[in-house]
Amino acid sequence: MNILEVEGLTKKYDNFTAVKKIDFTVAEGEIFGFLGPNGAGKTTTINMLCGLASITGGTARLDGLDYRRSLPAIKSQIGIVPDESNLYEELDGFDNLNFCASLYGLGKQERGERAARLLKLFGLTDAGGKRYKHYSKGMKRKLTIAAALIHEPRMLFLDEPTTGIDVASARQIRQMIQELNDAGTTVFLTTHYIEEAERLCHRIAFIVGGEIVRCGSLKELMKTMQQGTEIQFTLSGGETGPGKDFKEHFPDYSVDESKKGEVRIRAAGEISLYPLVNYFEERGRRVYEARVIRPSLEDVFVRITGLDLEKMKQEKGGRRG
C-alpha cells in the first residue's frame, strides 16, 4: 500500500524550475531515498512534501489526502528533520521536546513522558537538562530527529541527516533510522552520500537537475549493470597490458589494465578462468588473485547520470537543493 503518491510535482522560482514534473510513490513501511548531487532538487521536493514550500504544479497525496486541500491534517501525520536545525538554542533538550509536543496539542503529562522516552531512546538523557547550543553537531541532529517523532508520526522526512557530522554520530543516526523503520515508521530520506542510500533504502530515486532519471529497488537498479561478466586479475610483473596477442586468443573479451599489475577482463557471457590463467603464466605473469567484480550503486549512478562523483562528495553548498 502506498502512503505517498506524487504525480507531475513541479516547483518554480520565477524563471527557474527547481523540480520538473516528477512522479513517484512511497510504500508504507519502507525507506525511500532521493539520491543526487547538491542542487538537484532534493530539498525543494522535501519542502513541498512537508508543507514548507508551495506546490507550483502537479499533485501530491499522503494517505489519500491532497496537499492543496488537507495540509493541516497531513502535517499531523508527518515528522520533519530539515537539513538545518529548527530547535531553540537557549532551551535545553527536554524543554525543546516539550515545546514541540505542545505544538501538536499534547497534554503536559504526555509531553513530559514522551520527551523523557525519546531522550532515553536517542542516548541523550544525561544531556536533557543541557542547553541545545552546547550540544555537539551529532547530538543536535539526534535531538532534531527526536523532536520530529514527538507526536508519533506515520512518516518521517529526513533531509541530509548525516551531512556535516562526525563518522561515529553518522553511524549512530543510520542505525536509529533503521530501528525506527523496523518499528513501522515510513522514512523519506534525501542524501548525496551513495553509500548511505545503498545501506538504508529499500527503493532509490536518482534525481538530477530537478528530474528523476531512474527509480527502483537496489536489485532493480543493479540490473542495468549486470550485463555480462567482469573479472579482475592481480598479476606479477610490471608490464603494461596483458599481451599484444591477447585479442587473437580471446576475441570475445575486452581488456584494460588501469594500473600495473591489475588487469580487468570483460565479456558478454561467462568467462573461463583456466585458459586466462594459462595465458598469463605462459607469458611469465603469475596470477596472484582473480575475483569477479560486482557492480555498486556508485557504478549504476555514474552510468545512468554521467555525473562526476566528486560532486557527490562535496559538502552542501548554498544552492537551492
Image (cartoon, rainbow, N blue to C red):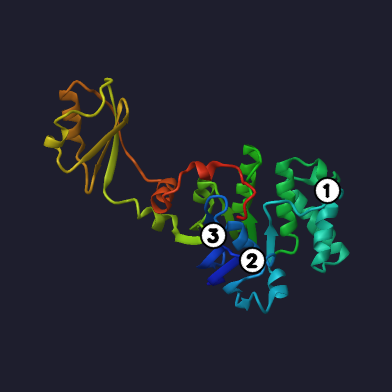
Q: Secondary structure at mark 3?
A: strand
Comparing labels 3 and 1, the label whose residue is closer to the camera: 1
Residue type (three-letter) at the residue carrying disc 2: Met
Residue type (three-letter) at the residue carrying disc 1: Glu
Comparing labels 3 and 2, the label whose residue is closer to the camera: 2
The image position of residue 19, as x and y in percent, is: 55, 63
**Residue tagged by mark 1?**
89
User: Is 238 rendered above or below residue 112?
Assistant: above
**Residue tagged by mark 3?**
32
Q: Residue at x 72, y 42 (%)?
A: 137
Q: Secondary structure at mark 2?
A: helix
Most distant residue in the bottom direction? 69
Q: Residue at x 81, y 65 (%)?
A: 103
Please state which of residues 100 and 190 is positioned toward the viewer in this rendering.
Answer: 190
Asked which quadrant contains residue 31, the reply is: bottom right
Q: Residue at x 60, y 77 (%)?
A: 64
Q: Residue at x 38, y 50 (%)?
A: 303
The image position of residue 134, as x and y in percent, is: 81, 41
Please state which of residues 135 and 1 is positioned toward the viewer in this rendering.
Answer: 135
The image position of residue 229, as x and y in percent, is: 27, 45
Among the two numbered marks 1 and 2 on one chain, the one whose residue lies closer to the N terminus: 2
Q: Secondary structure at mark 1?
A: loop
Residue type (three-letter) at the residue carrying disc 3: Phe
Among the two numbered marks 3 and 2 on one chain, the one whose residue lies closer to the N terminus: 3
Label 3: how many Cα within 10 Å (few below 14, some 14–19, many 20+): many
Spatial separation of the CA atoms under disc 3 and disc 1: 31 Å
Is residue 120 shown left or right of residue 246? right
The image position of residue 157, as x and y in percent, is: 64, 60
Residue 309's label in the rendered image is none
Among the two numbered marks 3 and 1 on one chain, the one whose residue lies closer to the N terminus: 3
Residue 48's label in the rendered image is 2
